[in-house]
Amino acid sequence: MKIGFPYLKEVEGGDVLMDETFHTCMSFGIYDDKNETIKLMTAEEISAEIDGGLPGFFRQNGVSNLISPECHTMAAKFFQDNKLKIYRALSDDLLENVMMLQNRMLQLFGAEEVLASSCGSDCSSCGSSCSTKR
């Protein structure tokens, strides 16, 4: 299974930490549990190189599940429209969350859990630097 996540940094000991949300994240990762590898790309690289932006990056790499500690309204809609499931992380440690997802311990973000943000009804109305923007 390949899992997308908002990448923050690798810490001493090799643990990978997730950023709080896709909304403000500058780098994104894909964890492949079969090969135990991580592929990283910055928002800038994705915008320049990948058709379809962030969902295109995930689709081209066979990702259908995402893990994130938080999720903003427009990002949730954007991912759901692109048939990506978003699971609520229970810690900032990637591998802990992958294990919990594999053991069916993570829950999908529900409508009431999605964080309200300054997002409007359409990405085209947005002037932010949001990395999930189409």
Image: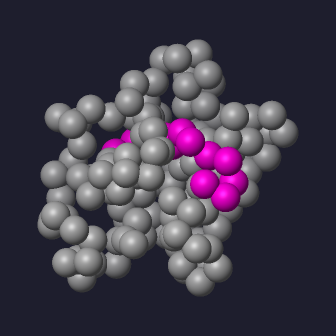
Question: Picture quarter containing residue 125?
Answer: bottom left
User: Observer-nearest residue: 66 or 37?
Assistant: 66
User: Observer-nearest residue: 74 or 71?
Assistant: 74
Per the image, is 66 magenta? yes
Above or below residue 133? Residue 104 is above
Residue 28, position as x, y percentages in the image: 57, 60
* For residue 75, side relative to residue 10 (left or right): left
Residue at 40% across, 34% down:
88
The quarter of the image holding the N terminus is: top right
Can residue 21 be seen here? The reply is: no
Residue at 59% across, 83% down:
48
Residue 54, position as x, y percentages in the image: 51, 64
Can residue 117 be seen here? The reply is: yes
* For residue 36, side relative to residue 100 (left or right): right
* For residue 82, side relative to residue 121 (left or right): right
Residue at 24% across, 82% down:
127
The quarter of the image holding the C terminus is: bottom left
Question: Picture quarter containing residue 120?
Answer: bottom left
* For residue 119, side relative to residue 106 (left or right): left
What is the magenta range? Answer: 59-70
